[in-house]
Each structure stands twice: as structure tokens, then as C-alpha cells.
Image: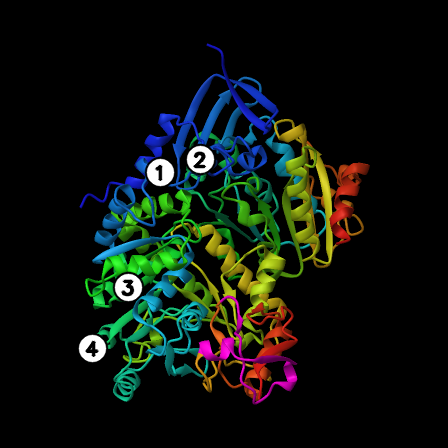
Amino acid sequence: MNQNRAPIYEALDNFKRQRVVPFDVPGHKRGRGNPELAEFLGQKCVGIDVNSMKPLDNLCHPISVIREAEELAADAFGAAHAFLMVGGTTSCVQSMVLSVCKAGDKIILPRNVHRSVINALVLCGAVPVYVNPEVDIRLGIALGMKREQVQKAIEENPDAVAVFVNNPTYYGICSDLKAIVDMAHKAGMLCLADEAHGTHFYFGDNLPISAMKAGADMASVSMHKSGGSLTQSSFLLTSDALSEGYVRQIINLTQTTSASYLLMSSLDISRRNLALRGKEIFAQVLKNAEYARDEVNQIDGFYAFGKELVNGDSVYDFDPIKLSIHTLDIGMAGIEVYDILRDEYDIQIEFGDLGNILAYLSIGDRIQDIERLVSALAEIRRLYKKNPTGMLSQEYIDPIVVKSPQEAFYADKESLPINETCDRIVSEFVMCYPPGIPVLAPGEKITPEILKYINYAKEKGCNMTGPADADINFLNVLKN
Amino acid sequence: MDIWFSESHTPDVKLSLRVTKQLFSEISDYQSVEVLETPEFGRVLVLDGNIMLTERDEFIYDEMITHVPMAVHPSIKNVLVIGVGDGGVVKELTRYEQIESIDMVELDEVVVRACRNYLPENACRLDDERVHITYGNPLKFIRKCENKYDLIIVDSNDPFGPSEGLFTKEFYGNCYNALKDDGIMVNQQGSPFYQEDAVAMQQSHKRIAGTFPISRVYQAHIPTYAAGYWTFGFASKKYHPIDDLDAEQWNSKHLRTRYYTTRLHKGAFYLPAFLEELLEEVESK
């Protein structure tokens, strides 16, 4: 296929020249009705904020330019079909789960998934079979799933419908995806991949294997993360094991009927860019990442981890574009370094957890900005270094699952002060966001270790989300 | 022919010089580099459309950024010069016999080449045996230095281009770390007159004042810079720029200057009311 094409972009460009008189939504009518918005976003932007119409196709039922854009994306990513998604990768992940599971079905997944996966289980009533990921004790982070653990889960749950894999985790850790796909298929199960952090795997060299290449059946790709499209735009990829029509019906259960052409054209243009120039782009990002890692590792006390973590199983591969840095050796929680970088040095990074920070590197970095980040870290070490004793380090705690997420979420519940909830079953999520991996999900038992984690993370300044009580002083638990 | 070069000082204000010849023009990896011949100001070095120096008025800048710290700290031996590698600051420094080593870090090799070829008056001392030139990112260079220099001179471009990293808190902190216990950092701090420049000057003063125990601003009049009015920052771990001025010692060196004198030295630190106010506004935070 001709990857120089960008059908949605071309149709919009053409549409602009037609000077069509709008008696349809949106009501701002090319910005005229909202001059302040037009001034802020620019005429070019509000001028293409239009509704579905015949020459521009309709995302709910694409037959022309959107369909062509999806076919081009499928070709670029090596998938049987690609869906343009405008509700973020969250909606991709939910559509994957809802496409393969119904109430009571079992799905095998690692517990360190994004909240959107467990949200989908709340919606559809499927039951999680968790594979507890390996944990790196020094870094405090969850790794991938071991092959043997996945095999065991499959054998113990032959009625499960699918295996779900992070490819990679937020920190860049990959499981042995190809082997897991083969195990799942052999047992008659589908394999779903969360590739929110793996768009570049499809285009760059010397990167971990992509889900479609490994033979997975569905993948959720955050084009807006490493791919350069606008926030909230993503691709859902499928193999020929799934019916395109059925997946579209599932997507349409929850997706808007007024999809934004800003988001869709950004997907179209970004796909074209990656298909034509992705190899060079990610070679440069990789070079920047390796440079940054080397420089950070010359600062005593910081550890920017990389491929040395690879162990052939729970860390089958590592995404070298991720710049994750362990901070505990200078006596600071990752979240503290994250806050100082923003407040004192005007540098915004992706997230900080208890023991690590993640600086997101991508298509848009400049080398002088990387120098600033490294120099700021050197300064933080010089000015703030302290004794690390007494610091919590373990980001991941194995859960005790008592009820299914849906059952717990909708059960009769009561709100209790958080420190009186020990040994009760929680009915809501608790997580630091980002990264958005729940420390508690509905149906799990609250333990002293988890309460200690929550109190510590709050004290260190983590942005905790999930519970109905925004201050997280109370938690909803199931009535006894 | 009537050809004029204009530099925008704000979107609504321009400085224009009549040009007789373009001597050099190259787009480097970092910026556009040009040398122009003008009747009034002689040869002019222009980076990304901004005048860096002219033959006619560069002595003011070079003298004020060099002699002020040299007259305060009695025994400066190791100096680091960061930024625009035209060689003017290095030329002033090499006049001091006491200086043993001058490290110079310049991001852009093209600037040095252009100056060597077209501004030899400025670049003439770059081959002094005490001068060591490194081409690379100054942030990277300096974060690896500790307790090494008596004086750091930050001779940067304005803060809205490739030099923006030289106006950051991390850079000033790295400089602090690279200086000895009695070290001094002097930087060009921009013009306090036009709004956008004034905000940049305030931000950089705030960051320096938050890093060094002593931080003072001084001024000079430079016709081709924005509003003809320029400031410098004097930051130090130990020496006060006026109380520790050793005029007698400096005058005994008998260095001939055209702008700097030890009397002017003191006067340069006495600032107009609006500028004092701008600085105090960020010092208290």
C-alpha cells in the first residue's frame, strides 16, 4: 500500500477548500461562534473541528476515507485490521477485553496491569486469574510474567478465554511474548497485548518484538505516546482471528458517535510519518536514550537501568528507549525527585514512584534538553542526598483476591476511615497515577502492608486516585 | 546600494545598521552565523539574527565582564569561559600574567572559525598557550568539574536559543560546584529595559541568587544591545564586589582600558530604582 497517503488529512484539506456552509454541529461553526477559543487554538485547528459527513466518513461505520486510513494503518503495523480510537488507549484496552470476555469468563493476566483492564472486568463481569509478576527487589518494580507461571495458569484454568500481556510495562520490561502467544494458542485461548508503551516496536530497529509480529490476536497501541499523535488518539490492532464487524460493534458500545477529526487526522498523519521515517526517528531516539543513560549512570547514586536486567524469562527483553532511573540510593523517593525537577528546575518528567523516576523520551526531544535533565539530576544529588535507610522501596505488592472485580464493585458497601479497613475487602481502586497500576483493585483484601504503602505514598506526595473519597481518608469496603 | 540589517529588540522596536558587505554566512548545526561589514560599527558578528558583537563597541562588554572579577579576587589562576567563542573575553584575560589556564567551552565550532577569519582583532589570543578550547555542550562539560576554577565567565547568547540551558538553575548549580571556595561567576544577564528581556533577567537573577551566597547585578552601556543598556551578574562564594575591590592592586598592573576603571567599578553596582525593584522582587521569593 502507498504509505505516502493520508486519506483523512487529504479529505479535510479538500473539505476546507470547498467552503461548505455549516448548518450542522459543532455549533462554534469553524470558530466564528467562539472567537476566544479560535484565538487560543488557532483558525487552522477550529476550522477542521467538524462533524462526520459524507466526504469525511464516519468512525462508527467507516466506508471511505476513515476505512482507507484504517487499512493503511493495518498495513503499517502488520495487522489484519486497525481501528482508529479516540477514547485513548483506555478505550482500546477495554474494547479488547469486552471483545473476548463475557460475564463469568476467565482471563489470565499479570496483576501489574493498567487500571483500564480491571475496569473492563468490572464492566463485563469476567473473572481475573492473576499471574503474580516477578519483582526486582532492588528496584522495587514488577517485572514480566515467567513462561512457567503462565503455563501453570493455563493448565489450571483450561476454561480461560484469553491471556493478557503488557508489552512492555511502563518501565520498559517485556515478557517472552512469542512463547506466551504460542502457549495461549495451543490451549485454544487468545492473546491480548497492552502496547500503550510500545508503539515504536513496530517501526524501529533493535527493539523488542511487537505484538502483531509475535502473533498476538489484539493489541492496544498508544500512538499518542511514542508515535507523536494528539493526546487521546490510539490504534486498536487485531489479527484475522477476530471478526472486524464484531469488534467494531463492541467499540461502538462505549465510544463517542462524534469522533474528533483533530484526533483522527493526527493518527493518519502520524502513521504516515512513522511508516515513512520511523526507522530513522527511533534510531535517533534510541541514540539519545543510550546517551542519557550513560550520562546519568556517571552520577554516583542514580541508576538508569537498561538491557543488563534481561534474564531470558521474567525480563525477556527491555525497551531501550525507556529512561527509568532508580533514585533510592541518594535517599530520595522517585516521587520526591519528580517534584523537585518540576518545582525547582522547570523540568516535567513522566512519573515518579517510590524508588524510581521515568523520563519519557520520544520523537520530539532535543539533545540540549537531555543535558538539562542530566545536569539537574547531578544538582539534586549534590543538594539533597541523604541516608536512604528506612525508605520503602517495593512498588508492587502481591494481591489477595477474594471476589471478582464486578461483584465487589457493585456489592453492598460501607465507607470506613482508611486505617480501620485492615482485613476488609475493598470495593474500589487505589493507585498512584501515573503509573496507574492499582495497589488495590475491587475484590481484594486490604493488608497492613498495603495500608503502609498507601500512607507512605501519600506522605511522599504521590498523586493517589481511585477511591470515591478524593482525599483517600476513607475507603469503601464490602459489608461483612 | 542601500542595504540595511535590522535586529528586532521587541516586535515593535528595531535597531538597523547599514551594511556594505556580507563577509561570512553559514548555517551550523545550532544556528545561523554571519559576519557583516558596516560603516558605523565595523565588522559585526550576528548569530540567529542577533548582534553578538561589533568591532566598535565590543570593548565595553569584554572589559566589564573580565576586569570586574579580576579586580576583586586577588589571585585568579584558573578560568573557565563559557559561551560565545569570539575570543574577546579571552583576549582581555590573557593580559593578566597571573592567569595560568583558560578553558573555553563553545558549542559551535563555526563561530570560532568565523571569528578567526573575519574578526582577528577579537580572536587573536585564542592561540595563547594558556588557552584550551573544547567544543561541546557547556552543561555536559561543567557538570563533570568540581572545585576547579577561580573564575567562571558565562559569555552566552540570549536565553531564547541554543544558549537557553545557560540560564537555568541546574547550570548555575553546576557552576557553583565547579568553583573553588572563593570562586566567582560572572555572567551576561541581558537587558532590563524591554518587558520580555526584563522577565528573563529576573528569572536568571532569581536562580543565581538562590544558588550563591553573594549575588549582585551591575550595568554598562552598550550601543548595539537592546535599549543600549546591559547588565551583568556577579556571583560569589566569598568576595563582595565592592567591599573586596582592591583598586590599588589592580591599578598597579597598569592595564590600559577604554571603559573599565576602578572608579566605574563601584558605580556600575549602583542601579536605577526600577532595576533595584525588579531584582528585589525576585530576591525575596
**Residue A150 pos. (x, y %):** 29, 82
Tags 4 and 3 both on a single chain = yes
**According to the image, label 2 marks what residue?**
A24
In the rendered view, does B50 fall on the left or right side of B96?
A: left
Q: Are marks 1 and 2 in contact (CB under 8 Å)?
A: yes
Label 1: state its secondary structure: loop
Is residue B81 or residue B19 the one in the foreground? B19
* Quarter holding residue A236: bottom left
Residue topped by disc 4: A188
Q: Mark 3 lies on which chain?
A: A
Q: Where is residue A140 in the image (x, y as percent from the top left)?
A: 47, 79
The residue that mark 3 highlights is A207
Nearest to N terminus: mark 4 or mark 1: 1
Q: Residues within 10 Å of mark 4 (few under 14, many from 20)?
A: some
**Distance between the alpha carbons at the discs numbered 4 and 1:** 42 Å
Start and end of the magenta stretch? A405-434
- Which marked residue is nearer to the observer: mark 4 or mark 1? 1
Q: Tell me the chain of label 4.
A: A
Q: Are marks 4 and 1 on the same chain?
A: yes
User: As rendered, which of A47 and B42 lies closer to the eye?
Assistant: A47
Q: Which residue is at a point 30% across and 54% down the rendered structure image?
A: A83
Of tags 4 and 2, which is closer to the observer? 2
- Mark 1 surroundings within 10 Å by alpha-carbon count, few (fewer than 14), some (14 through 19), many (20 or more): few
**For the residues carrying marks 3 and 2, which lies nearer the camera in this image?**
2
Pinpoint residue A379: horizontal percent, then vertical percent: 58, 63
